[in-house]
Image: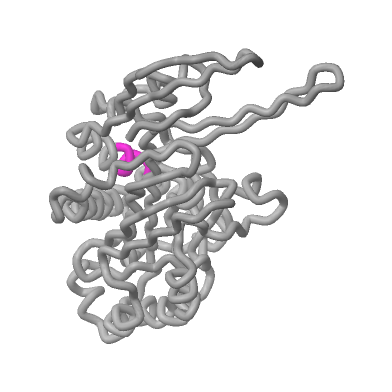
Amino acid sequence: MLKRLLLPLCFVSGLSCAADPGADGLAYSPAVVGISNAGDLKGVRKVAVASFVVQYVVKQTEDLVVDFEPPLTADPAFLQRLTEKMYGDFQASVKAAGLELVPHATVVATPEYKAMQGVSSPSPLLMDGWKLGSKTGAYKSLFYAPKDLVINLKDDYEELRKSYGGFSSYVVDETLTFTGRIGQYATNWKFYDKDLQKAVGASTLHVRVFVPIAYLWSSQSKAGGWTHYSAGAMAAVRLGERFTRLAVGKDGDVVKIYLTEPVMTRGVTDARLIKESTNFLGKVSRDVDYTLNVDGYQRVVPAATDATLKAFLDKMKENL
């Protein structure tokens, strides 16, 4: 998608150039992990995956429009396959971490989980929050869950960076639509989750993976009596720190393990400079054409997710 934007030349090749290759040779930066209510993890040995949601952003931002919806949705089964792979990898990682995992079939067959399914949104779930005035940009997303698992977006299971919203850890999820937000808030997931925990005799795990496709930045500097503001945007597939998290439900308590920095990727988007001009203030304006490497996307995103969720489980094990 071609749009005009203001950005330093070093960003034309992609901010994800800062990402280092992972152990498997794919390019993604390491996960930087935070945790809240860690003391509530004591005694957790048996777990059941109650929700696993991947939010694929397909169109993002306002000034620079990054629209990767056509390549990401050309094959209707593409994103579902990626979701199932990530879920399978996570199940294997849970077992490798030494935790007893309640089988998927056992979880979804319980009456308590069927009650959760009855109040869940369908998968895939479209959230088109394309609105002006959002300081974090605009999002059109598709939320996917593995077969039979619920989509849980209630903020009871969210941990957002405290620095993002000032002193409060609560930040409105601007990636959801108004209707979708109300629909999620109408469900008391903690109530249903406690019933499921009792039914399977285990703590519950809730995963959300947030995959934005653009990166926005802003800065402010002062020189004498002048204040200079700089802002820009670019295509950059990553795992977003705002919503990527693993929540552990135990007896009504919720432990949140989350990213405190984005996991950047490399080799997923390509940028081609179309033309460049400079205004009378010396500010450079460039027309950049961004394209998505679908093969890179389907390799790097699951690999980065796997590494991130393993880091979450490592943090969990530190506090058991």
Decide if residue 46 is in sight here.
Answer: yes
| 153, above or below 26, in the image | below
Q: Residue at x 17, y 34 (%)?
A: 295
Residue 173 magenta = no
Percent across and percent down for residue 17 are 40, 21
Residue depicted at x 39% and y 38%: 238
Give whichever of 39, 235 is nearer the camera: 235
Q: Which residues are magenta?
A: 304-308
Closer-to-camera residue (186/6): 6
* Quadrant in which the N terminus is drawn: top left
Tell me if 319 is positioned left or right of 199 in this view.
right
Compared to residue 123, the image places residue 240 above or below, namely above
Please tell me which residue lies in front, 271 or 44. Answer: 271
Q: Position of residue 254 (x, y in %)?
A: 51, 66
Q: Which residue is farthest front?
A: 280
Q: Main secondary structure of the magenta part?
A: helix
Measured as percent of width and height from the top left, residue 143 is found at: 32, 59
Asked where in the image residue 223 lies, by quadrant, the reply is: top right
Quick one: 3 or 259, which is closer to the camera?
3
Q: Position of residue 260 (x, y in %)?
A: 53, 42
